[in-house]
Image (cartoon, rainbow, N blue to C red):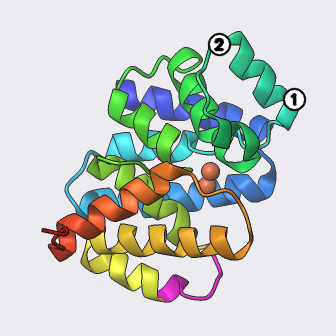
Amino acid sequence: KMEKTLIAKIEDVLPDTINPGRLKHTLGVVEAAKYLAQKYKENIFDAEIAALLHDFAKDYNEEQLREYIGQHDIIVDNILMKTYELLHGKVGASIARIEFGISNQDILNAIENHTTGRRGMSNLEKIIYLADFIEKGRKYPGVEQLRKLADENLDEAVLMALNNTISYVINTGKLLHPNTLYARNEILYETKNIRGIG
Ligand code: FE
Ligand code: FE
């Protein structure tokens, strides 16, 4: 199968691209993403490929990321540029397209937006976003509650993950990317049937 060849190709280069701890995390995200894809009836191969590549550029240093962005004419907003941890999604998506020949836009979007979320996330984007927070290696207060919710309702779980992220970002004095807030408000609006003023 075409997909199998692609997965093997990614698995070949991954250990030379990311550190061992991150490789373990990535394989945890693969497992969680495949589980969620099966549960919520999304394409399991797409979930596996997006999960395998989601942190591909995370061990690039700031200079490497900036250089890649400059060379590939990637458009980056101020907050992404100032928040080093958020940049690897955009670069990872570009590598997925150029180096691995991935043309499925949903997979590319899932890689690109796993760092912030965004308005109008597809189910695959939600699955990768969520799998990143619930993979088995993750340990933080509230992770069990989030895992339980992930088993029950995809949107509710993504909403909780977005809320956790926003709280964390505010409590640690970091920049909040507006896409995270847009994603959170949209899901809240849709799932809770909140009415606007008037
Ligand atoms: Fe990441
Ligand atoms: Fe990750």
* Drawn side of residue 162 relative to residue 99, left or right: left
Q: Which residue is located at x 35 percent, y 41 percent?
A: 45
Measuring from the top left, give residue 67's x and y in whole percent: 80, 20
Q: Which residue is located at x 50 percent, y 20 percent?
A: 97
Q: Nearer the viewer, residue 109 or 6?
A: 109
Q: Amino acid at mark 2?
A: His
Corner quadrant of residue 196: bottom left
Helix or strand or loop: what does disc 2 sit on?
loop
Residue to which mark 1 is pinned: 63
* Quadrant for the N terminus in the image: top left
Q: Nearer the viewer, residue 20 or 106?
A: 106
Residue to which mark 2 is pinned: 72
Asked if the residue under mark 2 is in contact with the one under mark 1, i.e. CB atoms within 8 Å, the reply is: no
* Drawn side of residue 62 relative to residue 7, left or right: right
Q: Amino acid at mark 1?
A: Glu
* Quadrant for the C terminus in the image: bottom left
Q: Main secondary structure of the magenta part?
A: loop
Measuring from the top left, give residue 63's x and y in whole percent: 87, 29
Q: Which residues are magenta?
A: 137-144
Measuring from the top left, give residue 75's x and y in whole percent: 58, 22
Image: 22 above or below 69: below
* Drawn side of residue 141 relative to residue 186, left or right: right
